Image: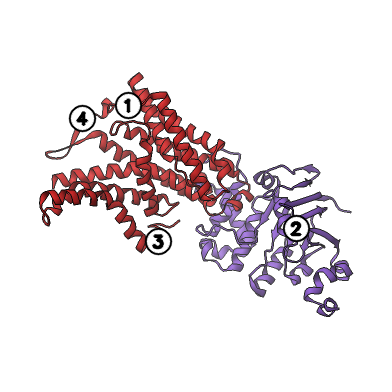
Amino acid sequence: MSEIVLHTDKLCKSYAGLRANHNLDLQLLRGEIHALIGPNGAGKSTAIAQLSGELAPSSGRIFFNERDMTSLPVHKRARMGIARSFQVSSVFDEMTILQNLALAVQAHHGHSFRFWSNINRHRSFNQQAHALAEQFGLEQLQDVLAGELGHGEKRQLEVAMTLAGDPQVLLLDEPMAGIGPGGSKNLTRLLDGLRGRYSILLVEHDMDAVFSLADRISVLVYGEIIATGSVQEIRDNPAVQQAYLGESEESAHAQA
Amino acid sequence: MLLFIEQVLNGLQLGFMLFLLSAGLTLVFGVMNLINLAHGSFYMVGAYVAATVMLATGSFTLALLLALLSAALCGLLVEIIVLRHLYQRDHLDQVLATFGLILFFNETTRMIWGRQPLFMDVPEAFAGSVEILPGVPYPLYRLLIIGIGLLVAGGLYLLISHTRLGMRIRAGASNRSMVAALGVNIRWLYSLVFALGALLAGFAGVMAAPVFAVESGMGESILILTFVVIVIGGIGSVKGALLGALLVGLVDTLGRAFLPDLLQWLFATPTANSIAASLASMAIYLLMAVILAFKPRGLFPA
């Protein structure tokens, strides 16, 4: 078995008695694309928020490279190598693509106190930003304000920004949401290109994207993981079919 | 005509002082989404410390430095002890807590300095006046306020649009979680922005000390004007704060100076005077109403 990068131990989150996550044992292996799927309200975004540090778990622990980081704040986890994207596009609309990327690059050099130094003089930041733009096919648009981009391009930019700090783990929260089939195909291809270099936890509703990208899939229902396995194992799993896939694909089973 | 130039300068001077106050307030509102009624307290702290140090040592430089330091330090402490816990709360909770801070600061200054206002002399180097036009003398100290306001405006522009810190401040204003996810220590960024705002308010307090009386509660009267400024300018926009502050400063000053004369064309003198007095004190609110009617989110919505 490959090495585990990120794992949780009995992670729980409840809000005033309402259970969002219960005893989550999730293992992300180095280099894999691991999809986390489940119906709306199953606790997928809660899981991402706990892993990235925005939500403190009610109980349970989170380990990154065997180090307990349950109580570390967001920015420390980010600097250790855990990057995330958001369900709602979170690029900075009033900055250009290049500025967005440069901000993401320099945010990881937060320990230096050379705050007042002129941003435009940091050649190396801009070079890295430029390289990222190129990698994501955004170099033609790099001087365009992010607010003027199409939704699909914003998504591309956001994923590019998560790579800026040279992370080990990417937590992607529904990157395909709302970008249409064309944009989705494009982004799927880009994510496929990242395979092996990053360990990716992908929360996604677009099943075509999930089935073509995922090395492994975990299925979350009512805050609990009911199955983890390869694409085929998950497709064949009766509990999954009943609880989740049945809703959309095999309505005949669901009606029975 | 000469009187007009003088009044315009007075208006600019009030405007730049309001700018020093509103720049911090609008940044704090724009970046942290926090309403801070106690912003005027940092102005008061700046004025009191400056007046006290000036009385004790006679050195304006020392007074200025210590006043800026105390205001920034007060801001930092208030942010860490109280306000940090209120960012996620709604505005009403923030208003309540920061109103409490006003009472705390006012009472504390009364305990330390007593109820009598302090008076601070204009520093010797800037006493006297210069002839801005042949036959028009103008107090040098008031020109200094205008000059400093211009410098601070320029400095803030450079800081916000051309430095890494500024880039983070702008980014933090538009999306807090994304900035944190990129690896920025957002708590520290917020403390820094807040302390910067308090420092600028303290600066305004130092500049105001020789012009107005230094007394407990001096922050509140100017705070209302400051809120008018940031609403006119567009909440969160420093550029808006600059323009809004100058507009409010000019309209307020010119209104008070010239409305009585203008109205004398229409009414008898006593009537004109009383109407002018009430119109002049309403002028900035009328200005705000008119601007909001056309631009509901202020001149430069952030």
Q: Which residue is drawn at 75% across and 57% down?
A: A200
Q: Can residue A223 be seen in this view?
A: yes
Image coloring type: by chain
Q: Which shade of the palette goes to chain A?
A: purple
Q: Are marks 3 and 4 on the same chain?
A: yes
Residue B70 position within the rendered picture, expressed as x and y whole percent measured from the top left: 45, 30
Local secondary structure at mark 4 = loop
Q: Distance between the residues labelled 3 and 1?
A: 41 Å
The amino acid type, in three-letter code, at marker 3 is Pro
Instruction: Residue B296: give its label.
Output: 3
Give the chain letter at badge 4. B
Q: Residues within 10 Å of mark 1 (few under 14, many from 20)?
A: some
The amino acid type, in three-letter code, at marker 4 is Gly
| A181 relative to A213 in the view: left or right | left
Comparing marks 2 and 3, which lies closer to the viewer? 3
Q: Badge 4 is on which residue?
A: B128
Q: Badge 1 is on which residue?
A: B118
| Quadrant in the picture for the C terminus of chain A | bottom right
Residue A168 position within the rendered picture, expressed as x and y whole percent measured from the top left: 73, 51
Along the line of sight, the residue nearer the viewer: A191 or A240: A240
Instruction: Residue A201: give its label.
Output: 2
Q: In this view, does B269 lie above or below A172?
A: above
Q: How far apart are marks 4 and 2 (CA)?
A: 70 Å
